[in-house]
Amino acid sequence: MRMLNGENAGRYDVVVVGSGAAALTAAATAAAGGRSVLVLEKSTLLGGTSAVSGGMLWIVDNHYARSAGLRDSKAEGRQYVEAVARGRGRAELLDAALDHGDTMLRFAEDELGVRFIFLDKFPDYRQDLPGAVAGGRTVEPALFNYREALGPLAEHVRTDGRHPYTMQEYEDWGAFTAFPWDELAARQAGGLAAKGHALVAMLISACLRSGVQFAVEARAAKLMDANGTVAGVQLEDGTEITADVGVMLGAGGFEWDRPLADSMLASSVRLMCSPPSNTGDGLRMGQRIGAMTRGTREAWWAPMSYTGGSRDGQRIGSLLRFERQGPGSIMVNRHGRRFANEAQNYNDLARTLHSWDSARNQPLNTPVHVVFDQSYLERYGILDHRAGKPTPEWLIEAPTLGGLAAKIGVPGQALESTVERFNSHAVTGTDPDFGRGTSEYDRYWGDSANAWPNPSLGPLQYGPYYALEVVNGAFGTCGGLATDGEARVLDVDGQPIEGLYAAGNTTESPYAAGYPGAGATLGPLMTMAYLAGRRLAGQPAAYAPQEAVSA
């Protein structure tokens, strides 16, 4: 255990396990209410999965939307989430997330100093379902100078190394080939952070202002009991830390414990992009004292490719977005055929990689590849590779479609006929096979400057041709300890365990297996963490916000 600020007092009002957005929100909220708080981080870096995420929050009926005159309601949000989650969520958690989401947002702005940007044009993921809106439920963190704010602690905050730009700027700039990379490099050198890096940095800053202490290399192993109440934690090295009011678990999911993940998840995960420290510590600690678990078959699924990246010494995947959604690229399965709308949201698309062909006792679709041509590479690049550079090892190249088919092991005639059919419709802006480009979400991730009628569709034009293998990946698991609507952990009989709270990927998601929109992980988990923090501080869930809306 290594303290980053101050000396270990051994006794605190609140002990928080983990340092992602859920843990930090609870810590900052409890500390703002006057509690002494210690945050324990297992790894050497603060921020967890949140720090390497997009940092967006999905909040139904938020004050930004109301100020902009956009129509929304909690009733419509509930209808939509229930449809996305296929009725598998618990009403108590959904109600808590919807009823208190905007309260949390205002509290984060007014009391914690977190600054957000309103993304009024970012559509919900499933535009075909009742209650969806075409924009107004997503906010993202503003750019934040974490070096100035955090001082020496800045070097202990996790980052994925991406250049700092906002989603709002992405909307303006379009393709990565058009980004002002020199300007972004200057921002990075100057200490600016964006996305999840900015979010956790702002929350850490709030914690520091309220006296929260941080420790890294501090793996919590057991919960301490005092007459049936959780009274602290014992670390892996035997150190005991007392919590007079309660313990908050925000230690991430269990995706990096392979045996555990294989035994619980509905489908095997081939790649992850979260920190390797997510091995289910919070889940195990709760189970040891009789906590109920729910939703552990699910993860935040995403199609990913391996392009040589690593995190904490472990190889990680690259999430594919525009690479499969931009005009001029398609995805084909093991048979050389398209099998889904490539532009749909990553969570739903990844589920098609789980399908099994029982007659042949093999996966129905995998191996899967993104296929595109030289014209696509010249317009957009692919991940960090650009036209004119040597083709990297992770990208397969051939002068013809037939040659590419041979290299990726699919029937050549099938691939050629697939591209021919796709092209014939793409030039007219239609996709009769899978409806790509028909929804606001599809078109949002396309190219508004596209030469063809639909931002999401364009033909493959000339060689050489390229293929990138795609596998089933995940941001993290989204099931775990069951909680009530105040983030109190429940035992196997459904009763609250005194002194124990949890939020984030350590717990069952308020949206169950559903992924309604950008920020649908961080929005509800920060809301549940806010509720935990308020209760730990002895304060009501309600909060009287300042009148001004933060810019």
Image (tube, grey):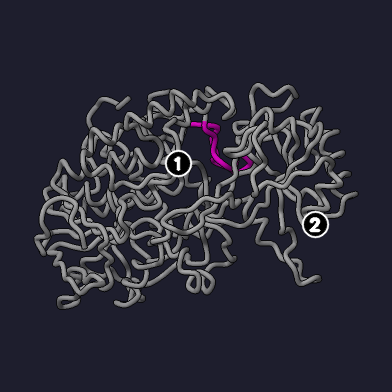
Badge 1 local density, few (<14 within 10 Å), some, or many (20+)? Answer: many
Query: Label 2's element?
Result: loop
Query: Mark 2 sits on what residue?
Result: 409
The reply to whether the magenta stretch includes residue 404 is: no
Residue 33, horizontal then vertical, whole percent: 14, 47
- Give the residue pinned by disc 1: 54
x 41%, y 66%: residue? 279
In the image, 207 versus 7, the foreground residue is 7
Looking at the picture, how far across and down is residue 11, in whole percent?
10, 63
Q: Does the magenta portion include 128? A: yes
Q: Main secondary structure of the magenta part?
A: loop
Task: Specify the quadrant of the image occupied by residue 335.
Answer: bottom right
Q: Which residues are magenta?
A: 122-135
Q: Image quadrant for the C terminus?
A: top left
Which amino acid type is marked by label 1? Gly
Q: Is residue 334 left or right of residue 105?
A: right
Tally the numbered discs: 2
Q: Amino acid at mark 2?
A: Gly
Quick check: can you spot residue 57?
no
Judging depth in this view, the residue of 332 and 404 nearest the camera is: 404
Snapshot quadrant of residue 152: top left
- Determine whether 255 is above or below 136 in the image: below
- Report the residue at 20% width, 59% height from top: 2
